[in-house]
Image (cartoon, rainbow, N blue to C red):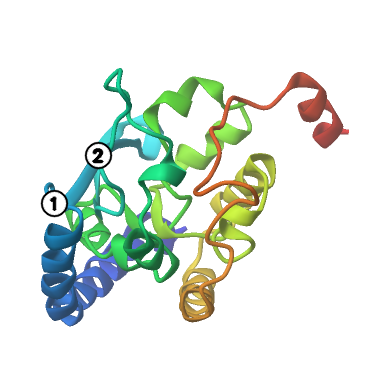
Amino acid sequence: MLYAWYLKRVFDVVAATLLAVAFAPAFAILALLVRLKLGRPIVFRQPRTGQNGQSFMMFKLRTMTNERDVAGNLLDDAERLTAFGKFMRSTSLDEIPGVFNVILGDMSMVGPRPLLVRYLNRYSREQSRRHDVKPGLTGWAQVNGRNAVTWEERFDMDVWYVDRVGLVLDLRILFLTALKVIRRSDVTSPGHATMPEFWGTTSREEGRRAA
């Protein structure tokens, strides 16, 4: 409990600051490549749901174009995700700006990944417990399937982490994350360029999992 409430924040600030310094040259080069290949903005900002259901602005390097159809609507992710963008995602290099979210206190190094604000009312009561802690740059679900598992499996793992927050577990997750990044595994959901929309867990599925 001491770690979860006090020491985790110290760990986050120290780790994120070290990463920010270490990746500064890489960030500068990637920012230039994003500008040349995808244009502006270089840093993609999007509201995400954080601890206690509060929203914050999450930072990532841009990986998609702004291509739209004749009606002015953005094309599907698969159509806007370039080869360069796929490389950025598979290596998690697009996540580098997230260290500033950690330094600002919106995120932690480890925790459930922050999801779209529009999902907030779609979670079951149990799934909503993922917001009892700060969202993370990486998490238990990310090292156990990442985008290759179902939403329900992902949320089960998020809640599992919430009940077991600790330094040893966080260090284990960070180590496993490094291995995942090196292997570039489980980046996408089968049949999708990214992760499909979460529309909520059906009552039938909730009943099966509760049994």
> In percent of the image, x 56 and y 38: which residue is there?
196
Q: Position of residue 35 (x, y in %)?
A: 12, 58
Q: Position of residue 208 (x, y in %)?
A: 86, 32
Residue type highlighted by circle 1: Gly
> In percent of the image, x 19 and y 69: which residue is there?
30
Precedes in sequence: disc 1 or disc 2: 1
> In percent of the image, x 14 and y 53: which residue is there?
42
Q: Dot 1 lies on which element?
A: loop
Q: Are marks 1 and 2 in contact (CB under 8 Å)?
A: yes
Residue type highlighted by circle 2: Asn
In this view, the residue in front, 196 or 165, is 196
Residue 123 appears left or right of 153:
left
Q: Which label belongs to residue 66?
A: 2
Sort mark 1 into few (<14), some (14-19) or many (20+) by Cα contacts within 10 Å.
some
- Residue 203 visible? The answer is yes
Question: What residue would you read off at disc 1?
Answer: 39
Q: Position of residue 113 (x, y in %)?
A: 45, 50
Q: Position of residue 185 (x, y in %)?
A: 57, 70
